[in-house]
Image (cartoon, grey):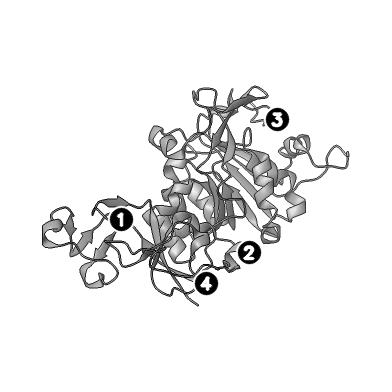
Amino acid sequence: MARIDLTNAKRAKNDEFYTRLEYIEKELKYYKPHFQGKVVLCNCDDPYESNFFKYFALNFNALGLKKLIATCYNGSPVSGNELLLDFGDTIDDPKKIAYKVEITEVTDVNGDGAINLADIAYLMQNDKNVISILKGNGDFRSQECIELLKEADIIVTNPPFSLFREYVAQLVEYDKLFLIIGNTNALACREIFKLFQEDKIRTGYTNFNVGMYFNVPDSFERFHHIEDGKKIARVSTSCWYTNMPVTKHNEDLVLYKHYSPEEYPKYDNYNAINVNTYTDIPCDYDYEMGVPVTFLDKFNPKQFEIIWRGGDIEWAENECAFYTPPTKEKAEQYKKLDNTWRIQNPYLLDKEGNAHVVYQRIFIRRKR
């Protein structure tokens, strides 16, 4: 099948999407200076299958890492054999239990002039590197995993799709730098959107609209193709999220179109004009504009102010200048809670008076 939607994956709780090394290398090359002397945590990553762990282990010295920590959870469904870890006689099948790996030194053990997985596996026997079984199930919300989070400087991983908002909330709570993969639909989620509004999160360098291919367990019925005996699924709704500096978000969008009431009609339930694509933002309009959520991939907080998002938003009645309140007759269509109106997506009326709802919009205003 052509693609998988992360929203459907979330509903089905199919969280096992394993990031391919090519995507990790492509994105992380822009952040190398930020890793010098840092403790990196991959807290959703079994070294048996995680390319995040592989990337940082193989580039430990090149990045100048102080320490690499990786944790996994019980019962990973993807089997791997590139990195065979030795727990001694403790358990029969280490892939089925939760454990952590801590690396503080990587050397070329076999003397072949390169660091490879054979070196990493051997170094697990080095006293400076530790592999141990976790007391719990490896859930990032468990106290022992939170203690590892506190120790880390930067978190890099592909967290469970179904727990993305909770995962990001934890990173924000503990004030951690992060670079993670998530659903593009999360851009419009209340909690994630607020972080964009406050310039506490942004999209990464990788093209926002290309989607990604992921390794998935054999149990998955929906996938794109099979490669080297492994099922590969294309996820069109995926992108990188980070709170580290990203150059493109400091670059101004070049605006060349001019405002006209005919080309930019106002919504009938919002005091804002409709803009169909971020490339059509007028250069001479200084008031509220509704733009697609894809604008956030180009958002420069020095050029634009984000006001809020359209649809399913609560607005305080005393702050309703931006929104045209419903008439008394229409009020029954909305739910009034705690002195707020719950309103719908922005819409435009045609000549016959029929309302045409515009797809998800966020509202912005130029700063200069």
Q: On the image, numbered disc 3 is attached to which residue?
A: 82
x and y percentages locating residue 280 in the rendered image: 50, 62
Q: Give the quarter of the image for residue 78.
A: top right
Q: What residue is rendered at 70% in x and 61% in y?
A: 33
x and y percentages locating residue 66 in the rendered image: 69, 55
Q: Give the quarter of the image for residue 310.
A: bottom left
Dot 1 falls on a residue whose secondary structure is: strand
Q: Earlier in the sequence, mark 4 or mark 3?
A: 3
Distance Cα–Cα, label 2 vs label 1: 34 Å
Tell me if mark 1 has few (under 14), some (14-19) or many (20+) residues whose alpha carbon lies within 10 angstroms of its own.
some
x and y percentages locating residue 167 in the rendered image: 45, 49
Q: On the image, numbered disc 2 is attached to which residue?
A: 247
Q: Is residue 34 visible?
A: yes
Q: What residue is rendered at 46% in x and 59% in y?
A: 172
The nearer-to-camera label among 4 and 2 is: 4
Q: What residue is rendered at 37% in x and 65% in y?
A: 273
Q: Earlier in the sequence, mark 1 or mark 4?
A: 4
Query: In the rendered structure, which amino acid carries the disc numbered 4?
Result: Gln
Q: On the image, numbered disc 4 is attached to which residue?
A: 303
324 in relation to 66, above or below: below
Q: Is residue 106 left or right of residue 169?
A: right
Q: On the image, numbered disc 1 is attached to which residue?
A: 347
User: Which dot marks residue 47?
Assistant: none
Query: In the rendered structure, which amino acid carries the disc numbered 2?
Result: Thr
Distance Cα–Cα, label 4 vs label 2: 14 Å
